[in-house]
């Protein structure tokens, strides 16, 4: 299975049916932002350390593994063991996706995404996170992201494990 198909597996597994027979539910940019917003508090307690960690693609695999864990377990409780580098990758991907979604909202796009009908709100949030962070979010155009101010926090080695404060 390709990484950008994990969200499909997640939806099928949660619904217990093949997706071909399930009508889609549409989501506006506001709907998607609302579903993804629930993940932002996970980054809050780690914000300074994440910002002080240099972005590196070598942590893509660890970040992808954390998202795969979310798909199989429907939980993020194992994410406390992730390194600062993996948290930085996830933050960059999520920030990029939020910027793209906001740009679509600004352009008054009515429907930005679809998911199979029947998922509860948490499952919708998880499915959208998987869809975005393992899909187009993996190809972050870093030029559109806010630039971190050097010296705002001490530099953290990217391999350092970050636990929520």
Image: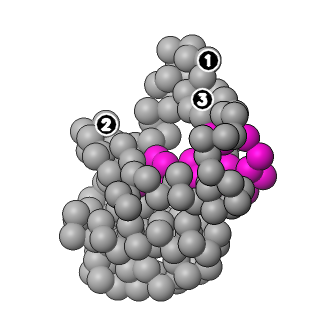
Local SS, label 2: helix
Local SS, label 3: helix
Q: Residue at x 58, y 59 (%)?
A: 10
* Residue range corresponding to the magenta coloring: 115-134
Question: Residue 124: percent from the left, percent from the top?
Answer: 67, 49
Query: Can residue 156 be seen in this snapshot?
Result: yes
Query: In screen coordinates, is 83 left or right of 104?
Result: left
Question: Residue 105: percent from the left, percent from the top?
Answer: 56, 22
Count neighbours of disc 3 (C-alpha within 10 A) and say few if under 14, some if 14 to 19, many if 20 or more: many
The residue indicated by pointer 2 is 144
Residue 118 belongs to magenta span? yes
Query: In screen coordinates, is 95 left or right of 121?
Result: left
Count neighbours of disc 2 (C-alpha within 10 A) and say few if under 14, some if 14 to 19, many if 20 or more: few
Question: Residue 52: percent from the left, percent from the top?
Answer: 33, 68
Local SS, label 1: loop
Quadrant (top left/top right/bottom left/bottom right) for the N terminus: bottom left
- Looking at the rendered image, the disc whose residue lies closer to the viewer, 1 or 2, is 1
Q: Quadrant of residue 123?
A: bottom right
Is 48 in front, or is 109? 109
């Amino acid at each position: 299975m390709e990484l950008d198909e994990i969200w499909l597996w997640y939806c099928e597994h949660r619904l217990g049916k093949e997706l071909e027979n399930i009508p889609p539910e549409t989501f506006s940019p506001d709907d998607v932002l609302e579903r993804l917003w629930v993940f932002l508090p996970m980054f809050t307690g780690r914000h300074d350390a994440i910002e002080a960690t240099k972005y590196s693609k070598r942590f893509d695999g660890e970040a992808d593994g954390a998202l795969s864990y979310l798909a199989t377990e429907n939980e993020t409780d194992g994410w406390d063991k992730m390194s600062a580098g993996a948290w930085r990758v996830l933050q960059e991907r999520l920030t990029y996706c939020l910027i793209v979604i906001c740009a679509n909202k600004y352009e008054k796009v009515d429907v930005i995404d679809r998911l199979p009908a029947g998922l509860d709100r948490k499952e919708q949030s998880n499915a959208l996170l998987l869809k975005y962070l393992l899909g187009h979010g993996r190809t972050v155009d870093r030029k559109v992201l806010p630039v971190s101010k050097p010296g705002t926090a001490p530099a953290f080695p990217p391999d350092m494990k970050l636990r929520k404060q």
